[in-house]
Amino acid sequence: MNDDVKVIAQSPDTAKVDSGLMGIAGAIMLGAILLFSAGFAQATVMHDSSHDMRHAMAFPCH
């Protein structure tokens, strides 16, 4: 019997590019979520959602 074995290896450069693209895609998605949630929310909703955290971090909001 003649068994052929093929080994497919991924080059390290390709792996670096893939992880870099995943990071860029994640940053774009996070930025879009923040932009659209801040853009379409009412001012009172944004204020109320961040109010307690502002005071916890010693940032005045009034």
Image (tube, rainbow, N blue to C red):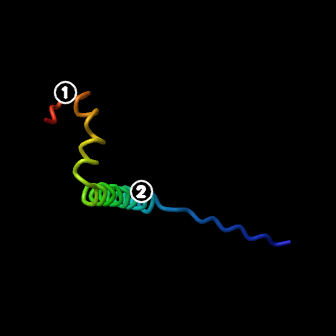
Q: Is 11 placed left or right of 39 in the picture?
A: right
Q: What element carries label 1?
A: loop
Q: Residues within 10 Å of mark 1 (few under 14, many from 20)?
A: few
Answer with the quarter of the image where residue 59 lies.
Answer: top left
31 in relation to 6, above or below: above
Label annotation for residue 19: 2
Q: Residue 36: horizontal and vertical position, in percent?
A: 29, 60
* Image spot of residue 19 (x, y percent): 41, 56
Of the 4 image quadrants, the one containing the N terminus is bottom right
Q: Which amino acid does label 2 sit on?
A: Ser
What's the CA distance linking mark 1 and mark 2?
37 Å
Horizontally, residue 58 falls left or right of residue 1, namely: left
> Is the C terminus in the top left, top right, bottom left or bottom right quadrant?
top left
Residue 29, position as x, y percentages in the image: 36, 60
Q: Name the residue under label 1.
A: 58
- Residue 4 appears in which quarter of the rendering? bottom right
